[in-house]
Image (cartoon, grey):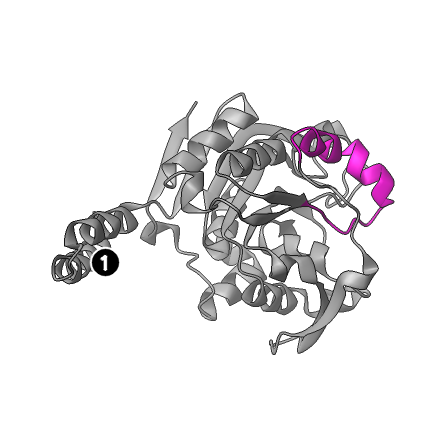
Amino acid sequence: MERRRFLKLAALTGAGLSLPDGLAALAEAAESATRPDLVLAHGAAPEKIVTAAIDAMGGIRKFVSRGDVVVIKPNIGWDRTPEQAGNTNPEVVAAVVRLCFEAGAKKVKVFDRPVNDPRRCYVQSGIAPAVKALGAEADYMDDRKFRDMALSGQALKSWPLYTDIFEADKVINIPIAKHHGLAKLTLSMKNWMGVMGGSRRQIHQKLDESLVDLSMKIKPTLTILDAVRILTANGPQGGSLADVQKLDTVIVGIDPVAIDSYGATLFGMKGSDLGYVTLGHKLGLGQMDLSKMLIKKVSV
């Protein structure tokens, strides 16, 4: 165990033992101190690797409680099939929906603001049919639910954002890892563009700063980076199977900077190669130095 985790555990142990329920506090402290920062799960079945990764993070009940309204935010931006890797893998999204219901979620909402026709994107991606079959909602986003919200960021002082994100009990971000012509890669932080109203093109001039501003405002309970298939070129829309690489992997964590820093390595890059990762680390949003993380790998 690295030194900072040992010190954290030692401090929490002392505090826990002084409480009436000290043993319970001690157990909770020990679990927190040894919980991985990231879990990488690899295997041929998306449902199994998602389940294994979340179990390694402590299990879905650490993140979703009975009676919760849960919002799941995948990428459903493009009129593409799952094999083309333009959107989040539908089996990954469905696995998370199933786990949320097993944890006792009252309602699960799945949505995105697509670039292409939403009616085609929701169906072609495979996401709407997969999650509706499990009892989740997969409604198109309602323009009346965007509300101007203060961000007080470096680039964005305010912006209309989708209110369902902030009214939910829990939010789970499920982006796909893929190439992007402007941002280099689109990973977890960039996935929040799908809850922006208005003209999103306006943020392209200060894209890195805007992505960090959004990520400072929206705090997901859990992030699951879909790398079952990654799009290595001609993103974010893609279209050619020649640009798709099958990795059969998901990366799960809480820290969006850590998720995106590791996600960069899937493309032969480092987190420091991405402006939004570097800026997020600098502003305290998260950790981009992989050597300082406890990373657990599981195969299924």
Q: Is residue 270 visible?
A: no
**Which residue is at a point 66% across and 32% down the rendered structure image?**
90
Answer with the quarter of the image where residue 97 lies. Answer: top right
Q: Nearer the viewer, residue 70 or 42?
A: 70
Q: Amino acid at mark 1?
A: Arg
Q: Nearer the viewer, residue 51 or 80?
A: 51
Q: How far across and how far down the image is residue 133, in percent?
A: 69, 28
**Which residue is at a point 47% across and 42% down the rendered structure image?**
252
Q: How far across and how far down the image is residue 122, in percent?
A: 78, 38
Vertical placement of 274 versus 80: above or below?
A: below
Residue stretch in magenta: 110-135
Q: How far across and how far down the image is residue 119, in percent?
A: 86, 40
Instruction: Read off the residue under disc 1.
Output: 4
Q: Is residue 45 left or right of residue 151?
A: left
Whether residue 61 appears in magenta in the rendering, the answer is: no
Q: Is residue 233 left or right of residue 199?
A: left
Secondary structure of the residue carrying tag 1 is helix
Whether residue 133 appears in magenta in the rendering, the answer is: yes
